[in-house]
Amino acid sequence: MMDIIYKIKRLIKPLPEFGQIGVRCRITPNIIVNKAENCILGNNIYIGPYAIFYCTHNNIIIKDNVMIGPRCSIMTENHNIFGIGKNIIDNEEFSYEDSGDIIINEDVWIGSSVVLIKGANVGRGAIIGAGATVRNNIPPYAIVAGNPCKIIGFRFNPQEIIEHEKILYSEEKRLPMELIDANYNKYFLKRLKQISSYIRIY
């Protein structure tokens, strides 16, 4: 019996010492984090198995009510490839041009095997499809897929977004109606033909 307990304990890895962690966070013990003090986690977060957080010099900021699927990679910097006379593996010089914070805002669902690269900012309420690569800003409530990811729709229409925000957020924290309408028109209504074409290929 003691031998079985010992084996179980060896399989359970302790969670990293995050820079900040809120309440009701469910984090699988087999994630890899290279500098946990640079990870800022809000409340009610789920991080699936085998996620990789690489944040040596910059921050990964995950706000409230976020789901992150298995095998996701979140990397705030690239390796420096520009050292003349150095093999890439031996070049440890850090370049701030190749780094940036990654922010995941509230109420986001990130599918399995997604890759978030330096400077990515995922807007509130967005959905990132499995296997997508995110390199830049994702508008609130957008649905994106692919590599590099493209917007293929929105979770709600503008009126539904406004209703959703009224229920979940205090008035001062709600997104402005003008921003909601502008995003919906720019990234969806004006791109319906492109989106339809992309979805058929995807």
Image (cartoon, grey):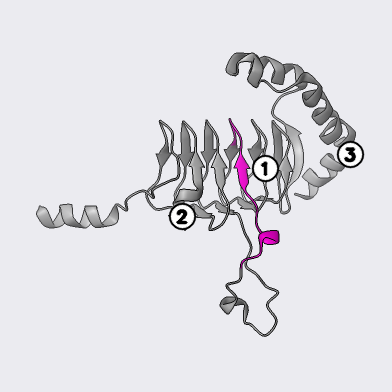
Q: Which region shows up in magenta?
A: 94-108
How far is mark 1 from mark 3, CA to CA? 26 Å
Residue sitting at 49 percent across and 39 percent down? Answer: 41
> Residue 146's mark?
none
Report which quarter residue 166 is drawn in.
Answer: top right
* Discs 2, 3 touching: Cβ within 8 Å: no
Residue type (three-letter) at the residue carrying disc 1: Asn
The residues tagged by marks 2 and 1 sit, at their Cα atoms, a distance apart of: 19 Å
Toward the bottom, the furthest residue is 85
- Pointer 3: what residue? 193
Element marked by disc 3: helix
Identify the secondary structure beneath mark 2: strand
Query: Residue 77 at what x, y percent from top left?
Result: 62, 59
**The disc label shown at residue 33, or none:** 2
Point out residue 147 in the picture as x, y percentages from the top left corner. Answer: 71, 54
Gap in Å between the C-alphas at discs 2 and 3? 41 Å
**Circle 2: residue type:** Val
- Kind of residue sitting beneath label 3: Lys
Q: Which residue is located at x 65 percent, y 54 percent?
A: 117
Mark toward the start of the polypeptide (2 vs 3): 2
Which is more toward the observer, 136 or 148? 136
